[in-house]
Image (cartoon, coloured by chain):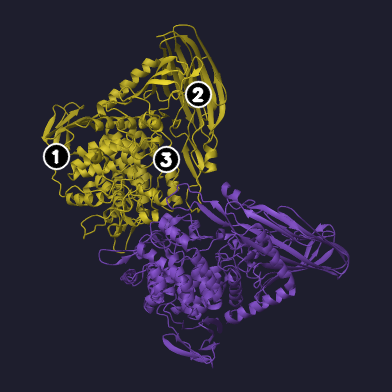
Chain colours: A yellow, B purple
């Protein structure tokens, strides 16, 4: 946990007022910067102390063996793991002859600020060396959202009370020594010095290093160049070796005088391009950055972000903590995806090595809704990445003796990397989640071209997967057996409601897409018989219901399983304290599953069913996954438990800022960050799109006086501004156009000439707010 | 597969008429010798060539890490693996200066004979060296059934046509180099040179080596001594080092002259005893062996075996192959268990390193029935071993948040070593299988003292396990969820019929045992309320039945799962060609599961249900486990498919002799060998004891004209002699005593004064013989 006093609540930035070494690793994740291509953890400029040094390039990975004490057919033999690449963030400083290290001397002031509008991380330190020399260091770091291969650092040293001789070593360092990552010596061997040197060269003021991974055979380049400003004499020299390059700047500063260094960094990697081509690519990016200049990069960064916020900002009046958190969330999700450009968006973005840098269903399920409504180009690029791994997904399906495509549960490059099949391969719902993301993109943007380009192929191949996975019983009911839904505490089940509803939607979407793209579908061999089979299976899909209890079992028989003993088992997460063999056959839920089905496929449930289901599952959900609080917020809001929804929203928003899952050190939870947005926009805003139309139904809890959020829908930008009484919809763009939405259960026509104000629909909850398992009340309840 | 011409069909021995190097590893397993304490693979005396050198001591193991790419709570971190100990079988021979090696020179004759009555492995070789010198080697090896720590070899070299100088090096070699056993470097490191030298010493004619394992910290001693006879001058010297000792015998032989060496070997190990104590123990055993002498050892061996065969032999007239195979089976099962003495009986006995040397439910489920009826003292010792690991089983249950005891799925020492929980931890039925074995021992022997000694504790703690594992639903029906039955192709299910019936029997047996041992039960805290809860759960246990199909689903819903596509999937075993995620939710059966329930808990099924269930499961069973054919034989016989039962009997009997599962090289399948006995005695003999009385109901297939088998029941020895018309029961021992048995459905009183002859009950099958999946007809059908 991170104490709530560490980061003062400020609307547009994350600020640490003094250095907290005990949460250094967590703050490195929180202060991480990225553009989706390059990722820098918020390590201190001087490299040490550190929690986890981290510099990442999207999809730059190494292969490592996946060990099994008892192997099985179809288990992936190789995993993929993100690699810490050449560190260009390093700026080591010597004051006279003493290294600037916050652990020595006296640190009189230290502040770090991640600014969501400027897109910079600014650090100010006032330090007194052990010998009593005081200096001020002001560094500003950016990873450029406009120049994809570029990062830059402005590093300023100011003498305070007396003359100091200052030496700055600006470095590129490959194969940094890292904390031990694995007990398996084979894995450790792969990740210890993962980069083989290929080439190093330097000029007076810069250098370039090229390295290559051994097994995945990827080549990367890191380059730096410098501008140096200082009043007096300065000496600048550069040297380089296989795993390092250092530009050394030496000067003397009188009190008040400043040394200013701007360090330009360029990164690139390729699995295909030649060494000279990659070298030149990095050199060109570096030249371009220097041509733009520091101020130019700063200006472009702000302009990019101004545009983003204009279409994406969420304003929360009455709850300043959530206000800050949702902007932090939007900013970090944007950083993870803005320039990913047909590469994956990992579960942790590029903020740490958690989950080995893998991408999960989180991307399509949680991150892409946010991007589709706020930065649709980034969503399209992420979907193009998925489509690009379709050949691997088809191979995987064939290996599993299935038709169509089976997308990986976790991967970097596209191959399945999950080593535990009951919560990996069996979680086939990832395929429907992907299909849904294509559908949402088409519905929200109104752009059918992505389907033509690649979405149709994904829809068809996932539909084929489902048809081969499911089966009609002797009474004609269609079942899907042996799959795992989102809740990983009950796995390999029959007729998981979430999976069956999502599969049915996938099958229908594929059939409909083939109807829109007749020639392309025919070219894929889709016949009208096949389309009919998809629709028939979708219509016959079994959705179990427990008539006695009046609730949906999460999967067949779930409501008749043993009740979990929550009295004697209150150490969470349960998976670290209870064996699967006990968790699976009990009514204990890791994360929203049936409740998520009600969010994503809400049309399949009546209002009463939703109320009863929420009541049932709230009592049995441990929220041991970071993906749960946001969904519980959304559905609690829908059934009228607005105060409970507010508490879940707070928890979802704080998962990283308060380190609620104790693993923020390994990177930020992108899906949960996106979930904080969903809790507000889908929860209190009531946003739904599962029936192909834009539905909104805002309603606020007592602690939020006003909520204002922005969405993109087709060619419009829509602002939703809600208070406790009414909601005002403002449509921008498309002069004189109108848009039909659904406000609650009613059709409402909006136009771009003037805002439309209507009263808020009040939902009276059918049931009293439910309790949670002991010690699993949402964090919000405990903070009050 | 091993060609059926390799081993001629002879009733009392396994003979290889010429050396087959291509099945050397398999024949090493088949010719293995053991007494349950020491195990020798049938390696050639001279050590090379070899398939797998193997010398084992029961329960002498090393610990190795169990790797998981994705770990989970409760997964065992360490495995146990049998260690190849100091090899005392080695007799290297030099003829003049050329080593006797069957790969060089000319091998004019080579015969190996494992004799089931003498308990020896005799080898005769007539070899011509590359230089043209011919010698005859006759070696006879025994592992003593009467002196537990002792083995011995008589090694005779005879010159043929001309004078030869003969050198024999009789050796002890520790840390032999073995074929690579694992791809995991950590495991390989553990198993490469697993023995640390502790002490070595030698006299002129013998030596002793002491070694210790590193992690499991077990110490072992191997000692040898020699008698040498030769007409002329002979030189005998001995040397030793850390990992070796060699006694060298040099002499000259004229044509017809013989060198005869008797090598006495003694082995011992301990986790507790001191180095001097262990050394002296081995030395004493060696002295004792030498005192007994070679002929004395031979005589005692034959006497021991004569007594065994007198109470255990099975005679099969009309099928000589099965005749030989069942005696081979009885002999090997006896070897695996005779002197195990409170150590485990591994799945492979001490014949190879398959399954890491682990013990499974095979022991109680398949091996102990044979021993209980033929060598009850060995059965009692095996059960005492189980009871001895009860403390570890209780710890494991506590770790799993369960009451009572959870015995390991696989182990050497007692700790759970299974690294795949759906087919390990979840296979809780092992606990009921153990309980059943205690019950059977009591019923068959009439000896309640083992319960008092240790069985009661096992029954009580396993009953407690079941009660904590099962649950009553809202209608009062008792379910066991999330368990795996014998069929590992459908795992983690609800209400596996086999498991539920066995658990119910376990609960009732525990309650009854507590009724017999009131004070001991009270001392364990058993109250009448607890006993009532056990009986109530047993009575309420759910046994699912598919009314529409008129068959029992193997587990809840099984008969509504997808039918397996047997047309396109005919590469067996399926587990090497299909992923679990596809196998689990399909109606494809690895091994008898529901069918095994009908064998072991036959009283719970009507005759019609048995017939219909056999018909249903025959069509869906792949027999990918070596434990299946024997059970299919038993139940096919019971429902009247006698010819099919004959075929399954043949297959069960031939699993190792024909290497049907392609892994006989790793050791023999003890449970399947015992299953060959069960196929005859329980199948064609109709032996059952699940209702506490001795039931027999013999009936023969057309290809067997007469079957005669022996059983021990209480203090009697009973011979059952059946032909196609009638059966004669002959009771021995207990003068003037009588015994009530059930012959078919009728009570029948036997007495020891005269045999009782009654007509055979003919069972007309309700249904036609069922087909099997393509390519899965029993081997018997194809041989015809």
Q: Residues within 10 Å of mark 3 (few under 14, many from 20)?
A: some
Q: Is residue B618 visible?
A: no
Q: Residues within 10 Å of mark 2 (few under 14, many from 20)?
A: many
Q: Earlier in the sequence, mark 3 or mark 2?
A: 2
The secondary structure type at the circle numbered 2 is: strand
Disc 1 target residue: A747
Query: On the picture, is B727 further left or further right than B200?
Result: left
Q: Which mark is residue A172?
A: 2
Which of labels 1 and 2 is toward the front?
A: 2
Disc 3 target residue: A355
Q: From what the image shows, is residue B766 above or below residue B122? A: below
Q: From what the image shows, is residue A205 above or below residue B739? A: above
Q: CA distance from mark 1 to mark 3?
A: 44 Å
The secondary structure type at the circle numbered 3 is: helix
> Where does the image place residue A694, in percent across and percent down from the top left?
21, 38
Q: Is residue A676 visible?
A: yes
> Where does the image place residue B437, in percent across and percent down from the top left?
47, 72
Name which quarter of the figure residue A755 lies in: top left
> Where does the image place residue A315, in percent across and percent down from the top left?
22, 29
Give whichever of A161, B336 is nearer the camera: A161
Give whichever of A644, A290 is nearer the camera: A644
């Amino acid at each position: 946990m991170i104490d709530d006093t560490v980061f003062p609540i400020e609307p547009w930035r994350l600020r640490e007022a003094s250095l907290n070494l005990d949460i250094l690793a967590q703050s490195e994740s929180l202060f991480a910067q990225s553009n989706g291509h390059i990722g820098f953890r918020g390590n201190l400029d001087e490299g040490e102390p550190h929690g986890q040094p981290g510099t990442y390039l999207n999809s730059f990975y190494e292969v490592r063996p996946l060990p099994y004490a008892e192997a099985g057919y179809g288990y992936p033999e190789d995993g993929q793991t993100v690699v810490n690449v050449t560190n260009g963030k390093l700026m080591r400083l010597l004051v006279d002859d003493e290294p600037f290290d916050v652990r020595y001397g006296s640190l009189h002031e230290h502040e770090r600020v991640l600014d969501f509008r400027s897109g910079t991380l600014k650090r100010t330190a006032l330090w007194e060396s052990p010998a009593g020399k005081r200096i001020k260091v002001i560094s500003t770091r950016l990873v450029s959202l406009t120049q994809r291969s570029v990062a830059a650092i402005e590093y300023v040293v100011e003498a305070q009370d007396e003359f100091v001789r200052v030496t700055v070593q600006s470095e590129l360092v490959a194969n940094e020594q890292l904390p031990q990552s694995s007990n398996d010596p084979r894995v450790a061997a792969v990740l210890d010095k993962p980069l083989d040197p290929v080439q190093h060269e330097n000029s007076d003021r810069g250098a370039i290093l090229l390295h290559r991974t051994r097994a995945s055979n990827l080549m990367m380049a890191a380059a730096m160049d410098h501008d140096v400003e200082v009043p007096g004499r300065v000496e600048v020299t550069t040297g380089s070796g296989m795993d390092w390059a250092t530009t050394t700047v030496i000067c003397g500063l009188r009190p008040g005088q400043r040394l200013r260094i701007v360090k330009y960094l360029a990164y690139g990697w390729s699995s295909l391009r030649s060494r000279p081509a990659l070298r030149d690519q990095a050199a060109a990016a570096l030249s371009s950055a220097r041509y733009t200049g520091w101020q130019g990069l700063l200006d472009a960064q702000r302009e990019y972000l101004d545009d983003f916020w204009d279409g994406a900002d969420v304003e929360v009046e009455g709850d300043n903590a959530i206000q800050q958190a949702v902007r932090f969330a939007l900013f970090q999700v944007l950083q993870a995806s803005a320039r990913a450009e047909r590469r994956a968006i990992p579960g942790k973005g590029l903020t740490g090595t958690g989950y080995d840098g893998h991408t999960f269903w989180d991307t399509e399920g949680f991150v892409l809704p946010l991007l589709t409504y706020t930065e649709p180009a980034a969503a399209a690029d992420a979907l193009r990445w998925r489509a690009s791994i379709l050949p691997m997904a088809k191979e995987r399906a064939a290996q599993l003796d299935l038709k169509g495509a089976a997308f990986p549960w976790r991967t970097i490059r596209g191959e399945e990397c999950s080593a535990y099949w009951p919560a990996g391969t069996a979680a086939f719902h990832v395929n429907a989640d992907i299909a849904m993301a294509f559908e949402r993109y088409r519905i929200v943007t109104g752009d059918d071209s992505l389907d033509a380009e690649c979405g149709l192929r994904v829809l068809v191949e996932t539909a084929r997967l489902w048809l081969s996975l499911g089966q009609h019983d002797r009474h004609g009911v269609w079942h899907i057996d042996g799959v795992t839904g989102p809740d990983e505490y009950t796995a390999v089940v029959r007729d998981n409601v979430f999976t069956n509803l999502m599969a049915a939607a996938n099958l229908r979407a594929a059939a409909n897409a083939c109807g829109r793209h007749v020639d392309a579908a025919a070219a894929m061999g889709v016949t009208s018989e096949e389309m009919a089979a998809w629709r028939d299976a979708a219509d016959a899909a079994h959705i179990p219901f427990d008539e006695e209890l009046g609730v949906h079992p999460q999967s067949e028989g779930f409501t008749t399983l043993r009740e979990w003993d929550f009295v004697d088992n209150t150490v969470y997460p349960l998976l670290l304290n209870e064996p699967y063999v006990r968790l699976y056959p009990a009514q204990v839920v890791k994360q929203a599953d049936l409740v998520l089905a009600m969010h994503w496929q809400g049309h399949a449930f009546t209002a009463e069913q939703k109320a009863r289901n929420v009541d049932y599952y709230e009592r049995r959900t441990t929220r041991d996954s970071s993906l749960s609080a946001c969904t519980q917020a959304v559905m609690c809001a829908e059934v009228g438990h607005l105060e409970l929804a507010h508490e879940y929203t707070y928890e979802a928003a704080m998962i990283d800022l308060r380190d609620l899952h104790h693993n923020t050190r390994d990177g930020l939870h992108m899906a949960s960050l996106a979930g904080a947005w969903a809790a507000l926009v889908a929860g209190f805003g009531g946003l739904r799109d599962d029936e192909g139309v834009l539905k909104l139904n805002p309603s606020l809890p007592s602690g939020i006086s006003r909520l204002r959020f922005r969405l993109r829908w087709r060619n419009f930008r829509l602002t939703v501004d809600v208070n406790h009484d009414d909601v005002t919809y403002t449509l921008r763009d498309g002069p004189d156009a109108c848009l039909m939405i659904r406000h609650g259960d009613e059709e409402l026509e909006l136009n771009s000439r003037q805002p439309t104000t209507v009263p808020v629909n009040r939902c009276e909850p059918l049931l009293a707010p439910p309790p949670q398992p002991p010690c699993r009340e949402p964090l919000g309840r405990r903070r009050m």
